[in-house]
Amino acid sequence: GAVVSQHPSRVICKSGTSVKIECRSLDFQATTMFWYRQFPKQSLMLMATSNEGSKATYEQGVEKDKFLINHASLTLSTLTVTSAHPEDSSFYICSARDGTVLNQPQHFGDGTRLSIL
Amino acid sequence: AQSVTQPDIHITVSEGASLELRCNYSYGATPYLFWYVQSPGQGLQLLLKYFSGDTLVQGIKGFEAEFKRSQSSFNLRKPSVHWSDAAEYFCAVFPTDSWGKLQFGAGTQVVVTP
């Protein structure tokens, strides 16, 4: 149980393109989903917290107009990297928490490797 | 300041040998504690978690962790490692005094030699 599916797993595109990444909870409802960015050999950096039916909460230093988050249902959150540039190249990982109980662990997707040429 | 520390950036262990990964935290109240494993190019998989109760926690893949309140530690152990255990391991804490965000340690890279 508690499977999180993230697509696509890898994206290579030209600079200026907008890229959408999907995060789905397959067997549970996720009121809250999280988007992380991970640089090589580093830990995860929280970008934003996505709440179903409301605006995402962005961490300090993360451009909300650059990284658009939509949490349209209890099983789907999307991250759109708008007008992507080479510096946006990174490994993006989503996670979801089962229900509204805060002590439930987060379950992670397999990540999306984004490469901007 | 609140923090979670994994003192070892890199550990090399022989296949069949025991493994212990250290994790220390600094929070006002005992947080919820987790260990995750990340294989190259993959997301994170939950190995085990501690909320309360028995301080020795059993997880998947033969891993266990022991919570020691006096040392503010939550070390991960495995009696006999397999080559497939080579990965990055992250300790994570969820502070309960402020219901803040999940905080990750810097990670420990485990290399398994034949």
Image (tube, coloured by chain):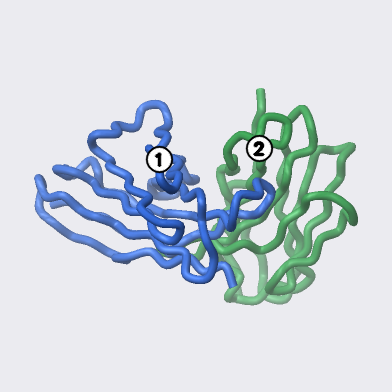
Chain colours: A blue, B green
Determine whether A1 is above or below A29 in the image: below
Q: Is mark 1 on a helix, strand or loop?
A: loop
Residue B40 visible at all: no
Disc 2 and disc 1 in contact, CB within 8 angstroms: no
| Residue that mark 2 sits on | B4
> What's the CA distance linking mark 2 and mark 1?
30 Å
x, y percentage for residue A63? Answer: 29, 31
**Residue placed most toward the observer, A26 or A73:** A73
Residue ID at (29%, 57%): A21
Residue B52 visible at all: yes
Can you tell which mark lies on residue A54? 1
Can you tell which mark lies on residue A28? none
Question: Which is closer to the viewer, label 2 or label 1?
Answer: 1
Q: Is mark 2 on a helix, strand or loop?
A: strand
Determine whether A102 is above or below A5 in the image: above
Quadrant of the rendering where the C terminus of chain B is positioned: bottom right
Determine whether B80 is above or below A61 in the image: below
Residue ID at (73%, 31%): B97
Quadrant of the rendering where the N terminus of chain B is positioned: top right
Q: Residue furthest top?
A: B1
Quadrant of res B32: top right
Determine whether B85 is above or below B100 in the image: below
x, y percentage for residue B51? Answer: 78, 50
x, y percentage for residue A108? Answer: 50, 59
Residue ID at (71%, 61%): B48
Amino acid type assigned to the residue bearing label 1 in the image: Ser
**Residue placed most toward the observer, A59 or B68:** A59
Is B106 on the left-hand or right-hand side of A85? right
